């Protein structure tokens, strides 16, 4: 996808350079239509257009030496750098969103686990109270139920 943008840009810049009388004197227009970006020597017929200023002679975008007069090449390098910065920022934002969603999922899971443990503690306490109040034959059944509730609590919520 990026290669097609660069190819379209390079083609448009070549045509613009050949069509204009003084090389580099004609403005370059960046056109956006349907999510696609193209470059040309005239404003866009469809979609918004933005006139790109010609780079100053000897512009050094990344510490590289540039040759004055290679405007198309300089613009191409600047556009490559801009696209790379945008992609890096977009990837960082996506990574941060994924981390935030993972943190929210972990928080929800921890909350559900805590709620389940509290529910089991409550059931175990109620079973122990029932066993303490029971008399006669029901006492053994209540004590068994209290023991089972304590075991379930120990399995589900250790510590």
Image: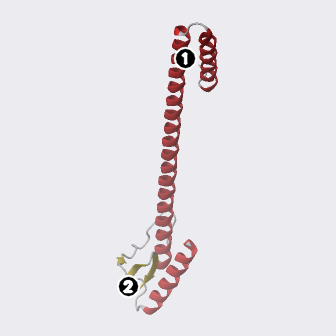
Q: Give the farthest residue toward the front.
A: 137
Q: Whole-percent x and y of residue 82?
A: 46, 65
Q: Which residue occupies the foreground of this view, 44 or 77?
A: 44
Q: Is residue 63 visible?
A: no
Q: Whole-percent x and y of residue 40?
A: 43, 84
Q: Which residue occupies the foreground of this view, 66 or 95?
A: 95
Q: Quadrant of the N terminus?
A: bottom right
Which disc number belongs to residue 46? 2
Q: Quadrant of the C terminus?
A: top right
Q: In the image, is residue 101 above or below residue 83?
A: above
Q: Secondary structure at mark 2?
A: loop
Q: In the image, is residue 62 above or below residue 106?
A: below
Q: Is residue 74 visible?
A: yes
Q: In the image, is residue 114 above or below residue 18?
A: above
Residue occupying the point 50% across, 25% down: 118
Specify few, some or many for label 1: CA neighbours under 10 Å numbering under 14, 14-19, or 20 or more.
many
Q: Secondary structure at mark 1?
A: helix
Per the image, the residue denoted by label 1 is 127
Q: Is 48 displayed left or right of 129 in the figure?
A: left
Residue occupying the point 51% across, 12% down: 129
Q: Quadrant of residue 147?
A: top right
């Amino acid at each position: 996808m990026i290669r097609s943008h660069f190819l379209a840009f390079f083609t448009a810049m070549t045509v613009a350079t050949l069509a204009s009388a003084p090389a580099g004197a004609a403005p370059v227009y960046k056109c956006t239509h349907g999510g696609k970006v193209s470059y040309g020597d005239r404003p866009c017929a469809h979609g918004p257009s933005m006139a790109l200023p010609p780079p100053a002679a000897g512009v050094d975008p990344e510490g590289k030496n540039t040759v004055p007069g290679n405007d198309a090449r300089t613009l191409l390098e600047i556009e490559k750098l801009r696209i790379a910065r945008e992609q890096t920022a977009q990837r960082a934002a996506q990574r941060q969103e994924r981390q935030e969603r993972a943190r929210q999922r972990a928080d929800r899971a921890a909350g559900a686990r805590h709620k389940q443990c509290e529910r089991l503690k409550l059931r175990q306490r109620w079973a122990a109270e029932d066993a303490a109040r029971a008399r006669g034959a029901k006492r053994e059944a209540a004590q068994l139920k209290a023991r089972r509730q304590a075991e379930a609590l120990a399995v589900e919520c250790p510590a």
